[in-house]
Image: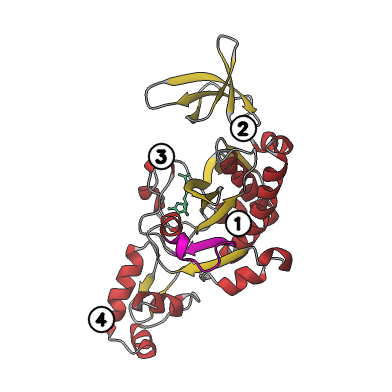
Amino acid sequence: MSTSNSVLFLLRDNVFHSGEELSGLLGISRSAVWKAIKSLRVKGLDIHSIRGKGYRLPREVELLDEDIIRGAIPANLRDKFQIHTYFELSSTNTHLLQYIQNFSDGDKSQVCISEYQTHGRGRRGRVWYSPFAANLYLSMSWRHRQSPQGVSGFSLVTALALAKSLENLGVKDIELKWPNDVLWKRKKLAGILLELTGEAHGDQLLIVGIGVNVDMPEHSEANINQPFTDLRNATGTRVSRNKLSAEFLVQIAKYFHIYETNGMGSLLPEWFSRDSFLHKNVELIFPNQTIRGTVAGIDEQGSLLLDLIDGSRRAFQSGEISLRACS
Ligand code: BTN
């Protein structure tokens, strides 16, 4: 464990710890403690300091714990996943994409979860702000055995599984925005990045990355350029990232199984019940044009259906939805 992670481990209890105590416990100098505090702050941790008392986190921090996550997954599903937790990665998606071949049990779904991402990636080349020990940054691999179901549907199905897992942990009023944003009161609560790593023995290997805002540090607005919220706001409580990871893995196994066996059809009613923009007048934004219409839902391929002003209905595989002011 690096020095700053050892300092964080001692500070996780929301009690003041003096610089002297930390340096004594870790066998390092006071200035090394100070450097560690500085580097944790740079990574997004709100560490309070009071002269004479020392350092304290504003709230207790539950660090990621592979054993707790595994223990919270029912025995019949546990062995489907191999879970790896990290203090720091560039991006959990990138890590899986690079190292998937090296993981020992290729048949299991490999799951990487990190406390911090130095280069968290969002859709469309955006940055995904990933402050330390605040949110959930999880990626998993999924071997898509040959079936008629298209790869694009997986991202919508991931959004459904994530919405269900949040609901099972007590989060109410979760809505979805096509293709795969998870919203609470029209603000972004979670995002999904799905990537394809090619084929192995005729199967397709997917990397599914989810970023869930759990407990954003104060002043995060400076780092995010869209309306966002977090689970602390949505529930008034602190949601456990370990429990959320386990619940998500349980739901994703169920939902992917339904999708691979039956296609999107049986999941459409659930999508419609959660669709934040259904029947709303929107603009669908492309790099070179904007199309206006009314959202009529999605089809069995997961494409967005828009009723256009000329009365026609068109299906779109890409584009960014934006609500029109008058709807
Ligand atoms: C979006 O733009 O809405 C998608 C955000 C996806 C973020 C997650 S965090 C875990 C995984 N690793 C990444 O670098 N990105 C995804």
Looking at the rendering, the stretch of residues picked out in magenta corresponds to 99-115
Q: Is mark 3 within 8 Å of ligand 1?
A: yes
In this orientation, does residue 34 appear?
yes
Q: CA distance from mark 3 to mark 1?
A: 32 Å
Residue 149 on image: x %, y %: 63, 39
Residue 204 on image: x %, y %: 54, 47
Three-letter code, disc 1: Gly
Q: Which residue has dot 1 on it?
A: 236
Three-letter code, disc 2: Gln
Q: Which residue has dot 2 on it?
A: 301
Which residue is at the far front? 201
Q: Say whether disc 4 or disc 3 marks the residue closer to the N-terminus.
A: 4
* Position of the C terminus by quadrant: top right
Q: Nearer the viewer, residue 185 or 271?
A: 271
Q: Circle 4 — which element?
A: helix
Which residue is at the far left? 31
Three-letter code, disc 3: Arg
Mark 2 touching mark 4, by CB under 8 A? no
Q: Characterize the local packing of mark 4: few (<14), some (14-19) or many (20 or more) Cα atoms within 10 angstroms.
A: few
Checking the image for residue 31, the label placed there is 4
Q: Which residue does the image show at 34% across and 86% down from the upper left? A: 23
Nearest to viewer (mark 3 / mark 2): 2
Q: Which residue has dot 3 on it?
A: 124
